[in-house]
Image (spheres, helix red, strand yellow):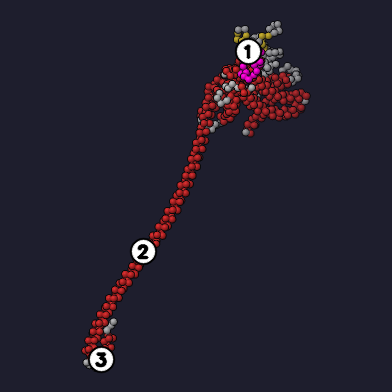
Amino acid sequence: MTLKSILLLLLLFFAGADIVSAGPSKTNEHGEKEAFDAGKMIVDHIVDSYEWHIATIGETHISVYFPVILYDEGAWHIFMSSKFHHGHESYKGYEIASDGQMKGKIIRPLPDGTFVRPIDLSITKNVFAIFVSSIILILVFLHVANAYKRTKKHAPKGFQSLIEPLILFIRDEIARSSIGEKHYEKFLPYLLTVFFFIFFNNIFGLIPIFPLGANVTGNIAVTGVLAFFTFMMTIVMSNKYYWQHIFNTPGVPWWLKLPLPLMPIIEVVGMFTKPFVLMVRLFANITAGHIIILGFMSLIFVFSQASIYAGYGMSLLSVTLVIFMNFLELLVAFIQAYVFTLLSAIFLGMAVEEHAHEEHH
Amino acid sequence: MELVNPGIGLIFWMIIAFGTVFFILKKFAWPSIVQALKEREQHIEEALRAADIAYEEMKKLKIDNELLLKEAKEERDIIMSEARKIREKILDDARVKANEEADRIVESARVRIQSERMAAITDIKNQIAEISIDVAEKIIRQKLQEPKEHQAYIDKVIESKPF
């Protein structure tokens, strides 16, 4: 236990180290004293990028570059993101937009000042982090599955016993209670996958050591895909009562449905708001946590611009606050995975509910 | 704006990655985990039920045992008291028998003694008669001589005759 807490503390200090190196680099790059922009630093750390910047020592950037894969005007363009030289140069007519609506994304500027956005299937920082966490997830759960085959009917051992309470929790508290005894087993694999995917990525997002520490679950594309999976699952698995509930809601006066289909419209909009809410909630919660942690860290540099001693003094307070925030984020990592899974289970439960439920309205 | 601008590539790779994870785990991990958990729960429940049954049976057995013990004790008491009675009876019988035997022995002794005595008396009578005849014969032989000497002689004879 103590060993683990020491490791955790070390990780937290590494989190500081990462930003320490990233912060002043902004001032050095142009050879002139540039004011430290906390907002820019925070956003740079949260959004996706084509390279994984680990640290900057003096003038040397330590970064991991990923392949850029573009499909534009009927041709594939594949090259390493190092060709952009941290976004300062263009390559084959493509460049990383420095501002505007497509800021941070690869565009092809046109002579008239507009730009073309190619189909961009590049392996980015988040894609890479997703691959890493996916491999870890698969390895972990194949290992756990083997452990279950081995220990059949006996008490769980090792890592299996760490995972088992979570599996039981999802099965009994989420799937069984939200979907019902009859259908829950059908959805259990999906709910377990979603929960552990989100939970692992949330935790990995808090560990600031390559190849972990990317803000995966705080990216709207990732949460959007997860919500989309839940939405598709709801549509595919829904029974006739679900559609009857939407288009001919029982127990509602006829004039709300007939010349003007008010209720059906509301219900159909509701179909889409549910996954939308799933998407935004997870994205916002995780991003907010990262922003707060990075914000506390930025305080050190903001203060040290006024006086180096103020910076030293602030670092003590900041690190303390960041440690506190990290513990809070550990809790949030679990709660958000839980909430996403629970809401998915509730939506799926609505889709397969069987009785005609007039008594509820 | 950057934050809420989803990258098409990320969406594409995310669908592939999550789909793959879901597919692999659904095929190779979750079924055996869920199945094993279910089996274990059933196993535990069965074991608990079996333990309950065993406990009940043990309780019943214990009661049976106690009953048996109680019966055995009662039986033992009965046997013991019977044995005691029998012993007393045997002792009594023996005592009676012994008394009777003793009486019988005493009686026969007495009879024997009586008969012996009678024999002795008869013998004495016979001897007395003999002696008397002898004495009388000797007296008669001496009679004609001196009366004084006569008397002395009688005394001498009587004295010499041992009884």
Q: Quadrant of residue B104?
A: bottom left
Q: Which amino acid lies under the numbered mark 2 shown in the image of this protein? A: Lys
Residue at 58% in and 19% down: A241
Mark 2–mark 3 CB contact (< 8 Å): no
Element type where label 1 sits in the image:
strand
Check if residue A289 falls in the magenta segment: no
Horizontal side of A184 relative to B143 (left or right) equals right
The mark nearer the N terminus, 2 or 3, is 2
Of the pair B56 and A59, the residue shown nearer to us: B56
Element type where label 2 sits in the image:
helix
Horizontal side of B130 relative to A22 (left or right) equals left
| Span highlighted in magenta in the image | A245-261
Between circles 2 and 3, the one closer to the viewer is 2
| Most frequent secondary structure within the magenta stretch | loop
Q: Which residue is mark 3?
A: B150
Of the pair A190 and A292, the residue shown nearer to us: A190
Q: Which amino acid lies under the numbered mark 3 shown in the image of this protein? A: His
Q: Which residue is mark 2?
A: B97
Mark 1–mark 2 CB contact (< 8 Å): no
**Do the residues marked 3 and 1 share a common chain?**
no
Residue A14 % position (x, y): 67, 26
Q: Which residue is mark 1?
A: A120
**Do the residues marked 1 and 2 share a common chain?**
no
Q: Is residue A210 visible?
A: no
Q: Quadrant of residue A29?
A: top right
Tell me the chain of label 3.
B
The residue furthest top is A112
Tell me the chain of label 1.
A
Q: Is residue A184 visible?
A: yes
**Gap in angstroms between the C-alphas marked 2 and 3:** 64 Å
Q: Which amino acid lies under the numbered mark 1 shown in the image of this protein? A: Asp
